Image: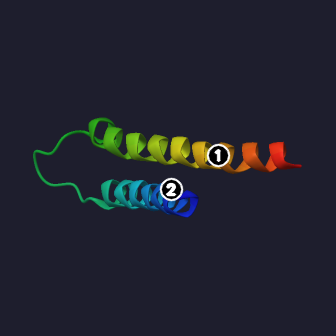
Amino acid sequence: MKQVLFALAFAGILGSLASALVFMLKRDKPGEKPDAERARPMMRALALRDGLSGLLFICVLVPWTLAG
């Protein structure tokens, strides 16, 4: 069960990283939103990745600390 949760969290981290990459590499089209508005989804995806990474780190660190 733990392995499945860790695999899902890791997949979420990679998915949000890939999403941020897609938003970053999008090309400008005439009449498109300014950069500040286009960057918002990328920043959300990176913030989600940071949150998931931190949560995964805590979920590994707490049991390791309590077991030792």
For numbered disc 2, what is the local secondary structure? Answer: helix
Q: Earlier in the sequence, mark 2 or mark 1?
A: 2
Q: Residue 59 bears which disc, if any?
A: 1
Left or right of 7? Residue 29 is left
* Left or right: where 4 falls relative to 36: right
Which residue is at the front of the view, 66 or 20? 66
CA distance separating discs 2 and 1: 10 Å
According to the picture, the residue beneath numbered tag 2 turns out to be 5
Q: In this view of the protein, which residue sits in the foreground, 51 or 19?
A: 51
- Residue furthest front as drawn: 1
Which residue is located at x 65 percent, y 46 percent? 59
Residue 17 drawn at (x, y percent): 44, 57
For the residue marked with disc 2, what is the amino acid? Leu
For the point 60% across and 49% down, the residue is 56
Q: Quadrant of residue 23?
A: bottom left
**Can you give x and y, in whole percent of width and height, for residue 48 in the image?**
45, 43
Q: Considering depth in this image, is 31 or 46 the residue closer to the camera?
A: 46
Residue at x-position 74% and y-position 47% = 63
Q: Tag 1's secondary structure?
A: helix
